Image (cartoon, rainbow, N blue to C red):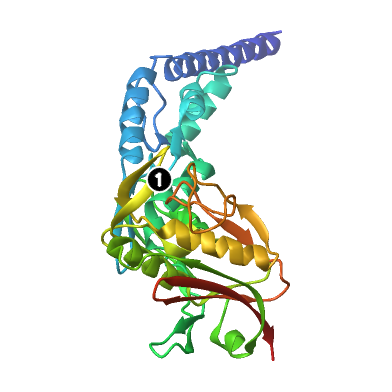
Amino acid sequence: MNNLLTRYKTLAIIVGIVLTLLGSLTIALIIYTWDKGEIASGVVLEIPLDKLRIEEARSKLEQTRNQVLATPIHFTSDQTDVSMTTKELGLTYTFDAELQQAYSIGREGILWKKAMSKFKASWGITFKPQYLWDDKILKETLNKSLSSLNVPATDARFTVTSDDTMEIVSEKPGKQVDVDSLITNVKKSSLNQTVSISIPFKEVAPSITRKELETLKMTDLLGTYTTHFDPNQIGRTQNIKLASKALDGTLIKPQEVFSFNQTVGPRTAESGYQMAIIIEGDKFVPGLGGGVCQVSSTLFNAVQQASLEIVERSHHSLAITYVPQGQDATVAYPSLDFKFKNTSGSYILIRTSIQGGTLTIKILKAQKV
């Protein structure tokens, strides 16, 4: 009987100790996981967040986001150094979901799960904000900001010498900013410090080479047309000569669309164009480049004879005298253009010549030999 009583006492003592320990542990866990409104120790979200209230953490992360979006990226080459912020390049930075995850540590689940998650965090836990690039904005911004660095390829061409013979001017390759490679480099760059990225280029091949032109021979006259002008009208004559010279030797590939404005270029005083009579609305008035429309109209009639496809052409608003009525093609840079497509099936060459007060434009067909 005494032995049984002793056993009961011993068991009671053990149970009491266990309950005391469990109670103490429970109290300790309650104290450890007590919600003080602060983020658990050891939590990092771009910056350390431990012991911060969620409002304080959000404020600090907003400051960090502003710094990241204001970080400049320098794009450099031999010719330039262009700086743009990550925000201008289309970067967005979000942290709301990650901040909520960080704040939930030690606050979710039963008591021991809260304690375990908080304890594990104390050894260090890192969350990453979401960096997102808007690819459309990134590409458009780089193209717009760096397009001036692009150098178009120059096709091999024929040129007219002083003794009226044709010579070949060799092609020159161009270069273009490799925007796709640049985008890859931007996305790999560090976002919390100023960086410098070398601008990659890719070569742009010309579409016509010297070797190709050396195999061409002008075999057929497809079309020719002649108009007349008064060489005593100095300004108008000068303008006709300049536009004709710009056309002379132009080589057009099969199916290529020729543009008068693109070939002749702007009619400016810097280019040598002078004041002469032009048509403006329903009036004849002085204007820069008067007479150029005679060149475009002469070319139009030669193109008509060559049976090539007219793509764009406009009439004058008033009657003119150097071509029959309805056979004119007015141009005004850059709004009004004369365009045609080379539907001949082979290369064609434009030749122009001026003798006294006569302008002749010929369209020759080129065959490979």
Residue 153: percent from left, percent from top = 48, 72
In front of the other: 356 or 154: 356
Q: Which residue is mark 1?
A: 279
**What residue is shown at x 56% (from left), y 13% (from top)?**
19
Which residue sits furthest left?
Answer: 270
In front of the other: 321 or 172: 321
Residue 71: percent from left, percent from top = 31, 44
Q: Looking at the figure, which quarter contains the C terminus? A: bottom right
Secondary element under disc 1, as helix, strand or loop, is strand
129 over 279 or under it: above or below: above
- Quadrant of the image occupied by residue 275: bottom left
- Left or right: where 273 falls relative to 316: left
Residue 162: percent from left, percent from top = 38, 88
| Crowding at mark 1 (Cα within 10 Å: few <14, some 14-19, many 20+) | some
- Left or right: where 1 falls relative to 102: right
363 over 48 or under it: above or below: below
**What residue is shown at x 47% (from left), y 43% (from top)?**
318
Q: Looking at the figure, which quarter contains the N terminus? A: top right
Could one spot residue 289 in this view of the protein?
yes
290 over 104 or under it: above or below: below
In front of the other: 316 or 32: 316
Amino acid carrying label 1: it is Ile
Residue 103: percent from left, percent from top = 46, 23
Could one spot residue 72 in this view of the protein?
no
The tally of labels here is: 1
**What residue is shown at x 61% (from left), y 85% (from top)?**
212
**What residue is shown at x 45% (from left), y 36% (from top)?**
92
